[in-house]
Structure formats: C-alpha cells, structure tokens
Amino acid sequence: MAGDPIDPARTPVIVGVGQINDRTPDPFAALDPIALMAEALSCADADGGGGWLAALDSLAVVDQISFRALNPVVDALAAQLGIAPAHRFQTAMPMGDSPIRLLNEAANWIGSGEARVAAVVGAEALRTAARRAAAVAGGAEGDHNAMRVRHRGRAPDYRQRYGLTAPVDVYPLYENATRAAWGQSLAEAQAETGEMWAAMSRVAADNPHAWLRSERTADDIIRPSADNRPIAFPYTKLMVANISVNQGAGFIVTSLAEARARGVPESQLVYVGHGASAHESDDVLARENYEASPGMRVSLEGALRANDLRIDDIDLVELYSCFPCVPKMARRIIGWPHDRPVSVVGGLTFGGGPIGNYMSHAVAAMVMRLRAGDGRNGLLFGNGGFATHNHSIVLSRAALPAARFPHDFDQQTRADATRGPAPVVDESYAGPGTIESYTVLYARTGAVSRGVIVARNPAGERFLAAVPAEDMGTIDILRDGSVDPVGTPGVATRSGDGLLAWRRTLS
C-alpha cells in the first residue's frame, strides 16, 4: 500500500552518474563507443564512491551505430572494465527512449531482488567515425545523416520512395499537423520553437557536459542562414538533433539498503520512481493522425499517476527534443509552463544528440540538479523511432510513497484504448485529395529536393504525393505561411518516375 513504510532492500536509488565528451582532434586517437562507455561508467563509479562496478549484477547497454562492426558491445565492454555481471543486455536498436526503458527495468531488477547493483550506459562516436571515414577516403565527406545511411542497400518501401526515410523527414509531419490542429500560424509556431530552443541553449551554456555551450537567440534558431541551413520544413539545423558528437553517459542503480550498507551519504542518493511506457505503430503511415500521440499522453500521464504526483509537484523536466514537435506535444499534455525550460541538459541540439543515448545524459543531469537542491522531483520523458516509442519516469530526492517495486510500467493497453482506427493506405491511388500534413525536404546546399504530401482521398484513405523541386509555386505555398496547407485540396497524378505529383487546386 502507498502508505506503508518503504522497504530499503526493494527501493531503487541512483548512486553514481558519469558523462564524457571526447573532442580529441585526431580521429584515430579518439575513443570508440566501447571506450566512451567504459569511461562514462568509471566516472559513475567514482561519483558513487567507488567499488560499484566490481559488484555489478546487471549491465545494460544502449545500442550504438557509429561503429557497427563492434556490435554487440556489451561483452567487450564488460571485458574492458574487468567485470563479469551475470545479466548482460544490449537493446536491439538505438531508440531515444532506451535509457529510460533500461532505468525502469533496472529499478525492477533491484526491486525484485534479482540484482543488487545495476548499470545502464551508452555512447556514440559519430563525429570520430565520420572523420575516420573522411581520412580514409582522402578527405571526401559522406552522408552526414547516419539514420538515413542505415537504410542503404535495402529496396525502398512506399514512404521511402517519396523521401520519408529518416526521422528528420518524418517528424515535420507532426510539426505541421499539430500547428494546424492548435490553430497556430506558421510564424506563431516558429516563434514557440525559437523561444524553447533559445532557453535550451541557455541551459547548455551552464552545463559543463553539453556539447555546444554558446547561447543562441530565438532569431538565430528560426532564421535560415549559411550556418543554419533548412533541413526539412519548417526545421533548420539549429532545431534538430546534433548527432556529430562523441559522447558517453551512464548511471549506477542499487537498493537503498545496499547504498546505506556501503556508507553512501543521503545527499548522494536520488530515488527512482515509477515509470510508464506506450508506443505507436512502427508504420508511420498506420497512425490515426499526426496531430497527437496517444502513447506519449499515456506515458507522461501514467508516470505522474503511478507516483501519485501532479505536474505542480514536478520541479524539473527533460522532454525529449530531437525535433520541436515532441516537446511541444509533451508540454501541452502535462501542462508544463511555456516560460520554464524543457531540458536539464540543453536538448539534443545543444546538449548533443548521441542517437539512442541522450536520455542517459538527461538522467545524469537530472541527478546532479536534484542533488544540488534545484528541486525535489524531476520528470524524464524519452521518445524513440518515428515518434513511436515513449518512456517516462520520475526521479526524486526522497522516497516516493506510491512507488513500490517491481512494477509493471507497460501502459500499452491503456494507450490502445484511447486510439482511433488508422486510415487505409492506398498506394495505387491517383486523383483528388486533401492535405493531411506535409514537409519540404532540402539538400545540404539548402536547395529544395522535393515537397512531400500526406493526403486523404475522398474515401478517407491515406496516400502520398510529391511536389517536384521545379514546381516552386507549390513549394512556396507549402512554406511561406500565407495560407495553411493542411486541409487544402489538390490533385495527384502519376508522373514519369512512377510517383504521384501533387498539384494544388482552388477550393
């Protein structure tokens, strides 16, 4: 029962956190992901007073993509650390929610008594990988979008044929659909992004572990420039995750009883509360709409409810910020004030975006902020995939009376009950339709590559269409803000490349 005294042997606490940024100029001398992970956990061990790594029962690793030939890395990491934990695990993919999922699982391992000490860690060295590849190729740079490169060599599916391949191609569908649903003009939505991201840059400037520590203004962020090129409308470079980093982070979880037995002072301890998770369909075209995420709502609200907390009880948050639509949706769900930062790290643009491991940095930063007395309770929300996977958890300076372990953090049934049916996708359709959402994709030069339309036909079925780069009249309508393209009619006709080409019609 919530009112019962806590059981110290079943109460998970974080005792150590560690982070590392490797800026070694020589890419062949820089650390690879295994070395980064080992260094991060060594820092976490030292932060917790030492001796924890030798006692690990569980070692959980976030998958890495920068040095794929090293995978799986968990056994090599254990060997490098000179440890042999009985439970070793590596996630199948590097999803942004992975560290929170692994923290939820570690808390359950501790709460069930199956482990005394557990560690979670991850790292990426994409900056080093790119520089090594460039050096081997004689200075030629490859594709900087690591997530897009992963799909090469596979036959493109329906959405990929239209250019919706990497997360940066897909998240704008949520940005443009939510803006329309919330009744915002393009200028209002961009201003919200600019203010939110400027606030994160200020957080990063005060965070010694952030990758970029220069404050930026809202205008810097939303105005395209030579240093802030457009990526996918309406996003610029300073609005998206910065994956060109070499970063590692990890943390150590144990029971309150074990921490006390080892003499860890109370000032060092941060208590792990309950979490909640839910996901959307892996198929981004099989979503009910792009205006909301039931999985996100259930995850965030579920974490608060499971800990018997309201948003007024939360002092600090980390709302995943790979792209602006995610923290925009999240803060509306929980009612987080617009004048308060949505990150304790600095966000994935300024704090750094090490693919699936950013939230390990968020856990570390939240622990440090709570220890410093900046608040009592912190809420962490991680998002992975294509706005697909959602994991939330609460950390606290004191034991949360409602938190008992182990607990079931899977809230999928609740999310599914709130979700409406997804429309049928008709890949063969051609004809009239109405725009549901859209984006404009850009080359690295800043030139338009194409527009991408997600539309509904008169029967309510979903289909895709492209706007060729040479159709600048339609491209400009999509991006100039004079009208909101969402809800406007058009006609899709088959073009020479087999794709549907979209032409706007007057309503």
Image (tube, rainbow, N blue to C red):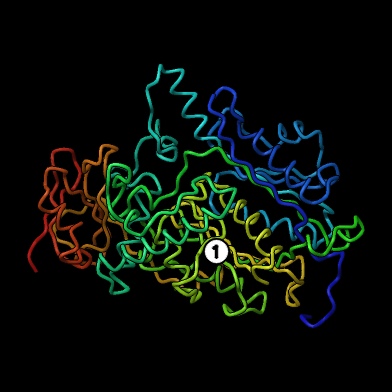
Q: Nearer the viewer, residue 286 or 398?
A: 398
Query: Residue 496's x, y, as percent?
Result: 13, 38
Looking at the image, residue 165 sits to the left or right of residue 12; the answer is: left
As drawn, 181 above or below 424:
below
> Residue 24 occupies which quadrant of the picture?
top right
Give the residue number, with chain letter if any, for mark 1: 278
As drawn, 496 above or below 18:
above
Q: Residue furthest right?
A: 261
> Residue 274 occupies which quadrant of the picture?
bottom right
Amino acid residing under circle 1 = Ala
Query: Residue 203's x, y, as percent?
Result: 52, 58
Looking at the image, residue 179 sits to the left or right of residue 351; the answer is: left
Query: Residue 393's x, y, as percent?
Result: 63, 65
Q: Residue visible at 75% across and 31% down?
A: 80
**Circle 1 residues within 10 Å: few <14, some 14–19, many ≥20:** many
Q: In the rendered image, is residue 101 in sight?
A: no
Q: Residue visible at 27% across and 39% down?
A: 443
Q: Residue visible at 52% across and 30% down?
A: 128
Looking at the image, residue 56 sits to the left or right of residue 169; the answer is: right
Query: Residue 116's x, y, as percent?
Result: 84, 54
Q: In the rendered image, is residue 350 in sight?
A: yes
Q: Residue visible at 10% across and 52% down?
A: 473
